[in-house]
Each structure stands twice: as structure tokens, then as C-alpha cells.
Amino acid sequence: MSSTNTEVVNDRQAMLLLLRHGVAFSAFFACLTILVLAPYRYLLRSVGEELSANEICELSAKEKVLWSSGFLSAGTHLKKPMIEKQQATILAVGSSRTMQFRTKMFSRIPEAKFYTVGGAVQNAVDLDNCIQNVLAARPQLIILGLDFWWFQAANGISSDDLIRDVSSSLTETKSIRETLDGYNRAFRLKVRFSVDRLQMYQQAWNDPRFHERLWAESRLDDATGRVKLGCKKTGGFRNDGSYRYSALIDQPFTPDQIAAQGEALVQAGKYVAAGVDQAACVRLARFLHECRKGGIEVVALLPPIESRVLRQLQAEDVGGEFWKQWPFITEQICGMTGHEFYDCSNPELSGISSQQFVDWLHAADTGHASLLAQICESTPASALNQYVDAEQLRADVINRVSELDLYGD
Amino acid sequence: MVFNSLVFCIFLPLVFVAYWLCRKQKNRNRILLASSYVFYGWWDWRFLGLILISSLVDYQCGLKIGSSAADSQKKRWLAVSLCVNLGLLCTFKYLNFFAESTATMLQMLGYRAGWSTLHVVLPVGISFYTFQTLSYTIDVYRGKCDVCSKPLDFFLFVAFFPQLVAGPIEKAHILLPQLQKARRLEIDSARHGLRCILYGFLLKSVVADNLTAFVDGVYNQPESASGFELLMATYGFAFQIYGDFAGYTWIAIGCAALFGIRLTQNFRSPYLSESPREFWHRWHISLSAWFSEYVYIGLFGGARVSGFRHVLNILLTFLISGLWHGANWTFVIWGGLNGILYFVAAPFRGSWWSKQLNAMVCFHMICATWILFRADSVATAMTIFERIAYWSPTQMAAGTVPSWYPVAIIPLCVVGMEIIGGDSPGVLQQYTQTTRWLIYSLALFALFFLGVFDRTPYIYFQF
């Protein structure tokens, strides 16, 4: 067919030659890929979409930031590494429901650093997995937000399941977020470039919202002087790891809308509980025990739930038995390991109104300020009193900027 | 196993290396046969029994036809081969269709049929390998092909994995001699194979699978789609089925080339045809050739008959071809309609523009037939025709635009690529290495960034 064949003596030599051509082409393709993707990645980096947890940590130490990402799963991408990187004295641990604790709430000792890794721990397995990080970080106090779904047997999620999800998402990418969530969990951000990432770019590129966000948010400085990073327009993480729900602060849901959202989920049977999950209890006990051994004080609490939705959740036919047992069991576990426990699930008891909820699961920082003040006032021996100035907090709540915005930042 | 799967991406290089590491031709064929059975058995190992029965019967029939002195004896063995192969095909593919059709007809005449249909699963690719193995016994009977005395070679001819489930349907006198002779790994042939594979994946994952969601969305609920959407979906389907089927056969051709075997080119830019007659010489060429040789000429006598009979022969051949595609009246009518269109000549003559106009007219005629091919039933096809015919521009709601935009872009890219590049990736051979590598890289980028990798099944597997 051509001159190449004349050089080839036998099939094995031909195979080797073919392999050589393959390697040469792969190198050519790799160089081309880098050239093609470099501007694209630069574009993403320039708006903060591609920043690593390290870089965000460094930036957060220097200037006022609001970091989020339209495409990376910010919760896992950013928060888990932050447990160790931030070296905080007071660490809030839990899901997004612990993301409304703020640095200014712990003002009694100014040099005591606060950081919330809210978002990094979504279930009891995550809690178990972060024990070593927490011990290595050695905070003096942990505020641990316990979510009811961690302990609902029917809702149990095993980390094995999450990792299995990744193997399927390698070929069947359903959405950018799903893929990246699984990718981050499975590879713990060690793999920086893969076909998944290419698919993410492709999906991002095909998503009109991407362009909208990219160009709209490419101006980094906004009126408040805050550095905005990432392509997400709606909000982001502040320097202390707390989350600013920018869009909802501007246009909050009405209490009826908030209640309706939760009630719809409850009625759909999403939170029907078969009982308290023993495995989750064991994991919680292990975490608390390890903290005790490491000399770390833990204040465990059940974050508030919008009152109408809470009543639905506690209804006999949905999860009556679970809601009777669960607070009691978790309190017992905390008691056994000598840690404090507060059931703050009923917002009315903490003086939090429905207007102080971002949505039915998330009370705003104004609500969390009331909650902390109430704990400190009702329990003078609480470890929180060392860091929280309850009087100041009450004053802050009175002078709040809006129902959902305590400090206006 | 399907080509667009991770398993196949591992399977092919393993077979390739094992195959060329063997020095003896016999061992190479053994490897190919074993891997072909693994490839086919990956779907359902029980269907391997059907291939084995078909291979065994035709191998024996070939031997008997070859050793028979009397013509009557040869005919008898040919009849055995035809009965077994067509019997298997009819049982698995057409039994329910004929039973239901007869029952409906009896019901229309006032009788009630007492039988019920069976739940028969259609084995993948049965229509393809049945036709291929039939070509052997017919060719041996006609003396066009030597008797294959080595079972290994013959069984490999029936089961050769690249073209086993969706063609190209190779005639015995073309493929068998290639399997029997010693082969060498030729670098250029292997390169050509890889080019064809890349082109095939491009057609499947970028062209066909990107159109699937829109086409299926509209065609699965045609009653809720506007005439404009149905029109767009029909154009989309024309390129979806082309990308899907041509993509498959290019991958098949490429894989075969890696093993030193040359398969028939099955598509030659069919949508650039100026008339339906030309279209059928460019679309699924191996099937058209099979029907032409064994049905149109072999069974009906071809063109060497009276004018009326000639017309009838063509119509009958297309009707049977329609039935081959599927056990449904939509396919039969599709075949008949193509038979009629076969006589429609290109309307314009002369300039370059006339050729383009002819291609446009031909494309629309073919698209009209695709409606029957894609619709679930004749009634649905009629509804689609009606909606498209009575479409008015006011139905073109702005909200529908994002869902059909790939239909407007992908076909243009395919047609543009074929006008500029020709009808085969082999044309790239004329360029310098750097240009070729740039083109391959571009194709790989398109595959990574635009490809859909959700393992969408190949349309032609159902046939």
C-alpha cells in the first residue's frame, strides 16, 4: 500500500511500529489538548471557578471574599479540606444547617478563630470519616449540628453507595453537579483532570446559564468591596465558611411558601422514618468519644425546623415514634460522653419566627443568634459562654438589618 | 457487546494483540472465532445456539451440494438450507406478525382466531447473519463459490464479530477467501481501520445520539407535536439513522481492517443522491446488492423479462426488503413506497445547481419514506403526514427552538463534511501527516465535547 510496509519484516515489527505511531499521535493530541483547553481553563480560573481549597484558604486570610461555584460542588470541594486548613478554635460541623453561625457571634474572645465547615458533613458516615481531620485540626470547641435524616433508618446513605455512583457517572453523566459531587468524594480531589472534567466543560458550555453567570460575574468587585469568586450569582461562602443566601436575602420566601415547600416533601413521604438507625448512633458515639479523648469540647444541637413543617414531621403517621425517640437517644449519647446537648428543633422555643427562615430547613443567621443567646442564658455552665456574649447577641438581633440578614454583610 | 461501550474498548485491543501475536493462520482464525462468540454471547449466551445451528446446517449443506453429482440432489440440499435459515428467521422475527395479521384478517371476515401469540425475543442480528450464511449455500449451488471444507473458516465466516450483528452483509465469495488465506499486518491498512473506527464513532456518538433525544421526544408523542416539530424530527431522524447505521458499519469496516480483512463499503454519501434509484446504490449497499443478486435477479429474473414484469420484480423486491427490516406493516409499506419511488427520475438536468436541487428533492422523498419507517403504526404515520401537510408557520413557537437546534446544525455539518471530504475516511490518506493528525484531533475533540456516551442502542440491531 505504501512505503511503510517495505520496512516491516514481520507482524510483530508492524505492531511495534503501529504502537510507536500511536504514542507519537497521543503526544501530539495531548499537546493540542493543552493548547485548546488552556484559554478555557484560564477563563474559569479568572472568575474563581477553578480555585483549589488551598487558594481559597489563602485568599480568605487576606481579603473579604464571597466564594461559590456554579459547577463545582462547593460543599465538598471547599469545606472538607478546610477542617484542617483553617485551624479554628471554634469549629461548626454539620450540613448546610450549620452554615448560619457567624464569626461575630463568638466575640467574647476576639483572638478565638471561628469557622463553619457546614456542608461537609451530610450524614453519619461523613461524620465518621472526618474524625481524623477534626482531631488533627484540634479546635477547642465544636458546635455539632445533628440532622434528623442522619438517624432515619430508611434514609441511610452509605459512603459505599456514593462511591458506586461515581463508577456509573463515568459513563453516564447526568448532571454537572452529580458528577462532580461523586468525583470529589471518590477521588478526594486527587485527580485533577479526567474525562469527567471534559464532560463537565462540555455540559457547562452547552448550558446557557454558564455563559450568563460567567459574563455577569466576571467583574470581581461589587459595591461592598467584597471579592466575588466563582460563577454562581446567587450567593456564596464568606471568609468564615458561613453562607450568604444573597438572592433570598433580597427576595425572601413568605412563611406560607416556606411551609408549603416542606409540607410537600413530607407529604410525598420523603422523611417517613422506620426508626432510629443504630449504625448512625454508633458513629455519633464514636465521634464524640474521640473528641473527648482528644480534649475537644462538643456542643451538639438539633438545628431548628420551620414550626409548621416540624409539626407535620412529628405527626404520628409520618414519624411520630422516631421524633419521640431520636432527641432522647442523641441526648443520651452526648450525656454518656460528657458533651452538651440542646434540642433546638422547635424554633418557637428559641424565639425564632417563620420570617427568620431562609427555607423550611434553614434558619437564617438572625435565628441562630437568638438560639445561641438562649442557650448561653439558660445554661450558664455551657462551654459556649466562654466565647459567646449573649447580651451583645441579643442587641445584634434587635439591630438586625433584616429578618434574614444579621450584620448586613 | 456493543461498539459504543467500555467493554468493547478493552475487548478490541486485546483481540488485536492476541491475533497478531499468533503466527499460524489457523490459530488466528481460532482467536477470531472465539472472540466472535464472546462478542455475541455478551448479550445472551443462549442465542449462540442459533448461530451454531445455522452455521452447522449450512456447512453440511455446502459440503453436500459440493459433493452431489445430480442437480436434483443439489437442489434438495439448497432447500434444506433455505428452510432451516428462513424457518429460524420466520420463527423468531415474523411468527407473531403473521399470526396477528391472520387473526385480524379473519376477524374482519367475521371469524375468530383461537390462537394466541408467543412471547419471542428477537435475537440480535439474526437477519444479518441469516442472509450472509444463505449467500454461501446459494453461491455454492450456483458454482460461484468453492465449498468450504474447513469448519473453522466457515464458522468464522458466519460469526465474524465486526459485521455479525449489523453488517455489512458479506457474500461468501468475497469474505470466505479472505478468511482462508494468510494475512499480514499492514500498517496502512491498520491505520485506515483506525480512521474508519474514529469516523464511525463520530457518526454514532456525535451525529446520531445527539439527535436521539429530540427525535424520540417528538415521535413518541406525535399527537402533541406541531407540524413543524414533526418536520424537524423527520429531518433529524434521517440523519440519526444515517449516523447510527453508517457509524456502525464504519466501525465494523475499521475493526475488520485491523485484522487484515476488507469489508464492503456500505454507505457512499447517500443523501447526496440525485434520485431514489441512486440512493439505493449508496445506502446499505451490501443489503441492496444481496437483494439484487439473490431476490431480484436470482428469484424473479431481474430485468430480462417483460416491462410489466420488470416493474413488478422491483416492487416485490422492495416489499420483501421492507419486511426484512421489521415485522410491521409500516416497513412493508415503506418498502413498497421505495419501490414506487425507484422509478422517479431526477427532475433537473445540467448545471451544478441542478444536481443540488435534485439532491434536495430526492432527500425529501426519502424523508417521506422515513416517516413510515420510524412511526409505530400506519395510523401514526398518517397522523404525522397530515400534521406536516397542514403545518402553518404560526405553529413555530419560540419555546420549541432550543430543542430542535441540533437538527439544523448536525445535518449541515454531515453534508458539508461529505461534500468536501468525500464518502470515505480513506480520502484522508492524500493529506500530509500533520494535516491528518490535526483532523484526527479535531474529530477526537468533537467526540469528547459533543459526543453522547449513554450507550444508546444501535437502531439496526432490532432488524
Image (cartoon, rainbow, N blue to C red):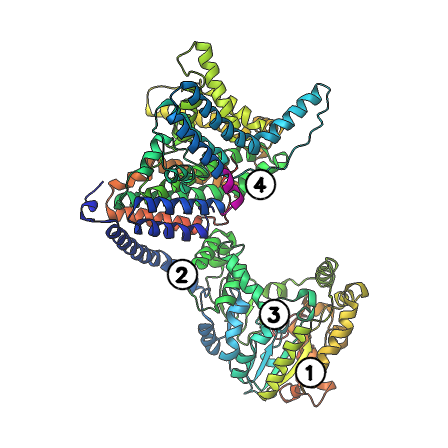
Residue B453 visible in the shown view: yes
Quadrant including the N terminus of chain A: top left
Q: Check disc 2 and give the amino acid type.
A: Arg
Chain ID at mark 1: A
Residue B84 among magenta residues: no
Residue A223 visible in the shown view: no
Q: Residue A221: image x %, image y %?
A: 47, 67
Instruction: Give the CA distance from mark 2 to mark 1.
Output: 47 Å
Quadrant including the C terminus of chain A: bottom right
Say which residue label 3 marks: A122
Instruction: Give the CA distance from mark 3 to mark 1.
Output: 19 Å
Mark 4 crowdedness (10 Å alpha carbons): few <14, some 14-19, many ≥20 = few
Q: Residue B391: image x %, image y %?
A: 58, 29
Instruction: Give the CA distance from mark 3 to mark 2.
Output: 30 Å
Q: Nearer the viewer, residue B209 or B170?
A: B170
Say which residue label 4 marks: B217
Instruction: Give the CA distance from mark 4 to mark 1.
Output: 54 Å
Q: Secondary structure at mark 3?
A: loop
Say which residue label 1 marks: A334
Q: Nearer the viewer, mark 2 or mark 1?
A: 1
Chain ID at mark 3: A
Q: Nearer the viewer, mark 4 or mark 1?
A: 1
